[in-house]
Each structure stands twice: as structure tokens, then as C-alpha cells.
Image (spheres, rainbow, N blue to C red):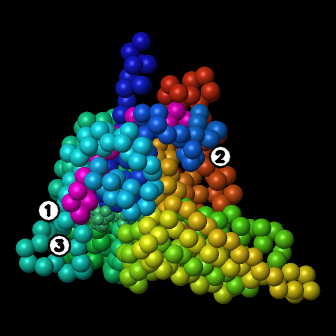
Amino acid sequence: MPSRKLATARTVGVYLVGGLGDIATTLLVGACAIRRGLASRTGLVTDLPPLDALGLIEPAALRFGGADIRPGTPLEAAGAVYRASRTFSRELLDGVRDDLAQLAPAFAHDPALQWSTACAPGDPPLAEIAARLRARLRAFAQAHDGLVVVNLASADAAPAPSACTTDLDALEAALAGNRKDLITPAMLAMHCALMEGHPYVNFTPNAGPELPSLRALAQARRVPHCGNDAKTGETLVKTALAPMFAWRNLRVLSWEGVNLLGNNDGRMLAEPQRRAAKLRNKRDVLEKLLGYPLHSDVAINYVPSLGDWKTAWDLIHFQGFLDVPMTMQFTWQGCDSVLAAPLVLDMVRLADLARRRGEAGAMRHLACFFKNPIDVDEAALHAQFALLLAYARDRAAPRAAGRRGIRRDPSPSAG
Ligand SMILES: NC(=O)c1ccc[n+]([C@@H]2O[C@H](COP(=O)([O-])OP(=O)(O)OC[C@H]3O[C@@H](n4cnc5c(N)ncnc54)[C@H](O)[C@@H]3O)[C@@H](O)[C@H]2O)c1
């Protein structure tokens, strides 16, 4: 039965920009552990019905590669995550040690992928950096039946305002003209992914999928993409909880949040320029959900001893009948990378499906995964999740055929 054989042999490459970071490392450990039957699939949204009837690529059929600006291997990175945070057990790490060791050749050390605003003499020009990245993507893609590029790199400063963000020709000209002051590393990563025809997932708050210049390229190349800034902790709770206040007609006066985190992401976000986009994404959501301005401040404090274990404390001051003030507080304590890693698998599986179905542009149905989703104004988690369910229901294959493949009917472009 050749078609059956082909279906099971299908592999999809996942190219991780920022491939040695905490999320990437936890993802690799998790994917290897799932493949070996050492870990459950708890946390995978795509295992829920009706998403499980979409014929998505199995996590065991994903093959990982990537690049990072720091040297090292996935195995070394996993050892570092274990020592810093005990995100996974020693037993689990030992169980996937050989698999991680084998991944080393697929991960490039490329310090040129990060730059500051101006080009120093001797630095490779943007066109050369892009050519190298594209060559790596091409080689990786050739070995598989599809490729998804995921940006898991550190939070960056926003791009300087310029026509590069709005106009594709201006972006191409700036790339050719080595304008490192106008093009951010994340913009370049997305540009390379799209030029090579691969779906792009922006897990970070960095600029990319929302920019009209890159969106024009995605449409021209017929490639799906999604972003920005995955919703894994405090904002996830906010977008589930704020509708409750709205539906009971309780007036929220203030919603203050303090985030304490000790991983490298926390260290990077300690820099005001880098955290600006993250803070905006966390703040804007409340006004959208409640429909009126309120006092809301969000702090992000770097506390090294916490490692990857994040604490978010939120205080909600609200008014009820007779204007009586009341307070709700919650404390969210989670392991950042454990919350994030399964979402990467979910988005990769769905991006691969979108690509196979010929869908292009913003993957609106993935809004529930992001703090700042593209082209979706709806901020409430339940309504965003309904978009995902509707997408899945519309495309789910009948159960009997579900695991064998996908429906062949053409689908509308996501725009
Ligand atoms: N953990 C979460 O729950 C969560 C939620 C939403 C968004 N994010 C975002 O996801 C990203 C990754 O988070 P993390 O905790 O793994 O961070 P991390 O700091 O552990 O990893 C980032 C990795 O990216 C590398 N890097 C930096 N700039 C690069 C570039 N230009 N090209 C290639 N590699 C580069 C770093 O060397 C590092 O290894 C961050 O932008 C973070 O803000 C995380």
C-alpha cells in the first residue's frame, strides 16, 4: 500500500531561530521524550477534538534544526536548563541524551544573526547574512516534506519607523543597501523564511507578521504566517478572566501586574527597549476586553534565582453594586518554557497543515495562542479559541480517515 507508506514516512523540518534558548531546548527535550514514549502529550492543544481529526503531522515526525547567536549544542543547552531550573528530571534528560546529541550538526552557530543598529566595519552585510540563512533553510527543507520556521530568539528593540515596515520594495532596497539600522534580525528571519516559501511562526514580541511589507511578501509567495508574542501565562489568565468582570457588569478600576522571572528572557527584558513591545502587548489587552480605559501597570522584574520558574502577581480592584470596591488577586506560578514548548508544537503542526492546504497570509485561527494576534480584534480567550474550533470543524476529516491525510478541497486564503 504505497500511499499509506508515504503518509507515515512524511517528515517535516522545524527550523528554530534562537535554537539554543530555554523554550527551544524544552521543546527538543519534549519532542524527543514524546517520540520515545517517555513523556505524555499533556499541554498539546492540537490533541483536543476536533483538532485531533485534522490529520496533523505527528510530533514524532518532526525533525529539528536551527541557529543561534551563541555557541553550543542542544545537549549542552539541555544540561544548562536542567542545572538552572530543573525544568525536567535528570531521568528524562538521560533518556533523550543520545537523541539530543545527534541534533548538534543541524544547529548552526551564527553570531551575525544579531546586530545593533549600525554596521561596524568587518561585519557581514545583511545580504550575506540572509543568503547564508536561506542556504541553510534550503538544505534542511530538501531533506523533508515541508519546513516551518519558528522564531524563538530573544526579544529585540522595535524597528525604527521607515518605509521598510510598510513597503516591500523599500524593505528589499534596505536589505540590498545593508541598512541594519532599519531591518531588525526578526524581520530578516521572516523575510528569509517567506522567500524560501516556508510558513513562519513568530513566538516572540519582535516585529514581523504585522508589518505590511512582510505581509505583502507572504501573499506574493502564498505562505502562511502567525504572531505575535505567544500567550502562555499572565496574559492568558487575563484574557480568560476579564470577560467575567464584563459579563457581570463589574467595573474594573485598576489591574496591576508584577512579573518576576529569572531566565535569560527575563534578563533581556530588563532592558527597557527590549521590553517595550512585551509591555504594550500585555497592557492593551485589558482595554480591548473591558471597553473602557483603566489604571493598569505591568512590571517585569528580573530575579535570577527563579530560573525558568515565573511568578506573576495580579491585583484587580473593581466596583460592584452600590459602587462597593472589592479586590481579587491571583498568583500564577509556572515554568515559562513548559508552558511555551507545547504551543510551538501546536503551531508548527497547524502551520504545516495550512501550507499543505494552500492557505496563505495571517493564520487568524491561531489568535488564541498570541498576546497580540494578527488581524483578530477579539481579545477574549474563549472567542479566540472558538475561531480555532471553527477552523478545525470546517476542515476535520471524518474520524476513520483522520490520521491518514487531509482533505483535498481548495480552501479560502486567510489574507
Ligand atoms: N517563555 C514564555 O512563556 C514566552 C512567552 C511569550 C514569548 N516568549 C518569547 O520567546 C522568546 C524565547 O524565549 P526563551 O525563554 O527561550 O528565551 P532565551 O533567552 O532562553 O532564548 C533566546 C535564544 O535566542 C538567541 N538569540 C538571540 N538573538 C538571536 C538572533 N537574532 N538570532 C538567533 N538567535 C538569537 C539567544 O542566544 C538565546 O539562545 C523570547 O523572545 C520571549 O520573549 C516567551
Whole-Å distance between the Cαs marked 2 and 1?
A: 43 Å
The amino acid marked with disc number 1 is Glu
The amino acid marked with disc number 2 is Ala
Whole-Å distance between the Cαs marked 2 and 3?
A: 44 Å
Location of residue 262 in the rendering, given as x and y in whole percent from the top left corner: 44, 71
Quarter of the rendered structure image containing ligand 1:
bottom left
Residue at (38% x, 82% y) in the render: 271
Q: Which residue is denoted by mark 1 in the rendering?
A: 128
Q: Which residue is denoted by mark 3 in the rendering?
A: 178
Question: Disc 2 on helix, strand or loop?
Answer: helix
Q: Which residue is denoted by mark 2 in the rendering?
A: 390
Specify whether tag 3 is near ligand 1 (CB below 8 Å): no
The amino acid marked with disc number 3 is Asn
Question: Disc 3 on helix, strand or loop?
Answer: loop
In magenta segment, residue 78? no
Residue at (78% x, 72% y) in the render: 245
